[in-house]
């Protein structure tokens, strides 16, 4: 895992664990869940994405791509959520989140890589099916964001999202299809074991919790995957899911998302189940 040389040199003097994170950010959620599972004390620095706090020069001197999360352990900066949770497990060995068996360890590593790959689809689907009610940026605000944020991939994405009323059907179909493939693969694995990498909860489960949670908010038909649904029910019983993910949502936020998803479907017919493989019956 590459160590990042921070633009903000004062980070090197920070003692303890520090996390720059967004309340709803899935990548932040997996780091918070790991910190909670490992019972570690940490310092919280909220970066509000809706308020574009990730576009400030100060934050971009911490995270070179202006994304959340960023993490500092006693002056050492780390980015990339799956790298951070792996680092935490390797360096804070109490309450290990790794399977004991080598085959299961490989499964865990593979699902961490896939969680990272799934991020672009999670982002597109979340911005389409959940985040549209966020206040639209004025042309001046969009211009300022484009000028201030150094991450051109993010700027292009945000412009496309802000300017249009809906992403292209092709993009939405592709993201739905890839997500459905991941969920179906997880469902198959979970047919014969309790957790993604064996009989013990591991980093692989933590990496995928935010994704399934996010899709449940957008009314993704999780009942198509019976074993994954059973897994999610067992996740919900873990206090780390409640403390580090659900409790960071504002009061009524989940209900607000669900109401929006329902209203949009009634008013416009637009709903995630109208796209890609979800538009077909589960058996086809
Ligand atoms: N691969 C990175 C992805 C980081 C990322 O994309 N973070 C999102 C939140 S989960 C973000 O900062 N988005 C900014 C935005 O949507 O404007 C990781 O796992 O940490």
Image (cartoon, grey):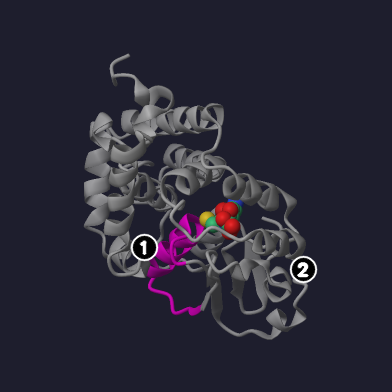
Mark closer to the chain start, 2 or 1: 2
Residue positioned 35% across, 66% down in the render? 249
Q: Is residue 164 magenta?
A: no
Of the four image quadrants, the one with ligand 1 is: bottom right
Packing grade of label 1 (10 A; few <14, some 14-19, many >=20) is many
Q: For marks 2 and 1, give the one nearer the viewer.
A: 1
Q: Is residue 42 magenta?
A: yes
Q: Locate the N terminus and report the quarter of the image it occupies.
A: bottom right
Residue placed most toward the observer, 145 or 251: 145
The stretch of residues the image draws in magenta is: 23-44
Task: Kindly report the distance in space between the C-alpha atoms of the residues bearing marks 2 and 1.
Answer: 29 Å
Q: Is residue 257 left or right of residue 77?
A: left
Against 184, residue 49 (above or below) is below
Residue placed most toward the observer, 6 or 205: 6
Packing grade of label 2 (10 A; few <14, some 14-19, many >=20) is some
Q: Name the element at disc 1.
A: loop
* Residue bearing mark 1: 245
The numbered disc on residue 183 is none
Residue placed most toward the observer, 247 or 261: 261
Q: Is residue 194 left or right of residue 150?
A: left
The numbered disc on residue 5 is 2
Q: Is residue 205 left or right of residue 6?
A: left
> In the rendering, at what x and y percent does residue 82 appear?
54, 53
Q: Name the element at disc 2.
A: loop
Q: Quadrant of residue 180?
A: top left
Residue 83 visible, this orientation: no
Residue positioned 23% across, 50% down in the render? 234
> In the rendering, at what x and y percent does residue 177 appear?
46, 27
Q: Quadrant of residue 196?
A: top left
> In the rendering, at what x and y percent does residue 95 appear?
37, 65
Residue positioned 63% across, 61% down in the render? 79
> In the rendering, at what x and y percent does residue 147 appear?
76, 62
């Amino acid at each position: 895992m590459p160590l990042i040389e921070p633009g903000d040199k004062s980070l090197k003097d920070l003692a303890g664990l520090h996390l720059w994170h967004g309340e709803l950010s899935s990548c932040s959620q997996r780091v918070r869940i790991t910190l909670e599972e490992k019972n570690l004390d940490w310092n919280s620095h909220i970066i509000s994405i809706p308020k574009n706090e990730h576009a400030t020069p100060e934050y971009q001197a911490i995270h070179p791509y202006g994304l959340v999360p960023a993490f500092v352990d006693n002056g050492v900066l780390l980015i990339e959520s799956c790298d951070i949770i792996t680092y935490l497990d390797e360096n804070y060995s109490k309450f290990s989140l790794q399977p004991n068996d080598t085959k299961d360890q490989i499964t865990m590593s593979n699902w961490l890589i896939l969680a990272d790959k799934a991020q672009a689809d999670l982002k597109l689907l979340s911005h389409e099916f959940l985040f549209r009610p966020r206040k639209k940026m004025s042309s001046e605000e969009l211009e300022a964001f484009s000028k201030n944020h150094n991450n051109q991939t993010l700027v292009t994405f945000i412009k496309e999202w802000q300017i249009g009323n809906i992403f292209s059907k092709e993009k939405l179909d592709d993201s739905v299809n890839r997500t459905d493939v991941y969920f179906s693969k997880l469902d198959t694995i979970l047919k014969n074991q309790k957790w993604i990498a064996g009989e013990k909860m591991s980093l692989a489960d933590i990496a995928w919790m935010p994704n399934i949670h996010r899709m449940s908010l957008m009314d993704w038909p999780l009942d198509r995957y019976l074993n994954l649904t059973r897994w999610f029910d067992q996740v919900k019983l873990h206090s780390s899911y409640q403390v580090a993910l659900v409790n960071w949502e504002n009061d009524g936020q989940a209900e607000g998302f669900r109401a929006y998803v329902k209203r949009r479907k009634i008013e416009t017919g637009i709903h995630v189940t109208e796209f890609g493989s979800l538009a077909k019956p589960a058996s086809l």
